[in-house]
Amino acid sequence: MLDVIEKLLILQERDRKILRLRAELTRIPIEQANASGRSAKAIAAHDAAKLVVKQIETAKKNLELEADALKQKIDKYATQQLQTKKNDEYKLYGDEIEKAKKLINGLEDQQLDLMEKIEAAQKDAAAANKIAAAAKAEVDAELAQLASRDNGFKKELSDLETTRAALTEGVDETTMSKYTRLLKTKGESIVVGVEHHTCGGCHMKLPPQLVHSVKAAKEVVACINCSRILYYTRDMDLVSSD
Ligand SMILES: [Zn+2]
């Protein structure tokens, strides 16, 4: 095998690691957003449950105010009833007082009903609170883990990138620029083997003369279809039976 091919294979292995780390790093913010969204949902559910409690409490308060207003009316009618000397007015005030008392009874029944509803809503809110707290704890742990993974990957990536230049030493400029171009367009598969007389990158059948050149290993040979750099090893002979 050509010395330069050996160097390129090592470089390619390095670039594969770099590309995979970069891909991992782009996924981390998405995972962070997903995790945060999960706890946000549980927190919103808890907020909604708390709001229900508040709404019922307000409704109950309104009933109390209504009852208070009626009680004041009763007091007023009672005073007027004492002051009047007319029988029909006396009776009229008496009727109004009875009517108001009935309304107050009805309001009190409604209040009791709402008190039960408040109790149930408070239970729901407490349960939602538990779920939200658990979700937040879980998400916080996940976010911490993601942050640490992010740090680790960034450090690893920086190490791999810093020492990469050393791996390009001894590779001639023409081959290097070819490799760099392929790295941009083909990603992690640039230096590929010849198997069954086909290119290991695009899997097109290669002309016998080209396969011969690759086997001879005198110069860097590229696939005529995809331009990837080709190499040949003895191990490939064992599988290139056709
Ligand atoms: Zn090819």
Image: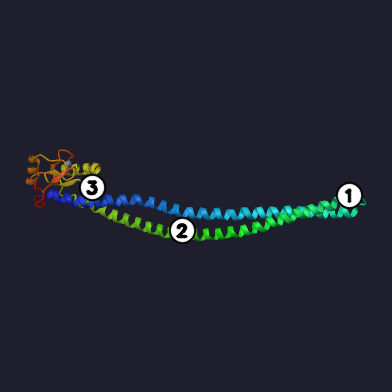
Q: Which residue: 85% across, 51% down?
A: 93
Q: Does the residue labelled 2 lie within 8 Å of ligand 1?
A: no
Location of residue 1 in the rendering, given as x and y in whole percent from the top left corner: 10, 50
Circle 2 Cα neighbour tier, 10 Å, few/some/many (<14 / 14–19 / ≥20): many
Report the amino acid beneath label 1: Glu
Report the amino acid beneath label 3: Glu
List the residue tagged with mark 2. Answer: 135
Distance of label 1 from label 3 (alpha carbons): 100 Å
| Towards the viewer: 63 or 191 | 63
Distance of label 3 from label 2 (alpha carbons): 39 Å
Circle 3 Cα neighbour tier, 10 Å, few/some/many (<14 / 14–19 / ≥20): some
Residue 153 lies, with reference to residue 199, above or below; the image says below
Q: Do the residues labelled 2 and 1 touch (CB within 8 Å)?
A: no
List the residue tagged with mark 3. Answer: 188
List the residue tagged with mark 1. Answer: 89
Quarter of the picture holding the C terminus:
top left
Q: Nearer the viewer, mark 3 or mark 2?
A: 2
Q: Does the residue labelled 1 lie within 8 Å of ligand 1?
A: no
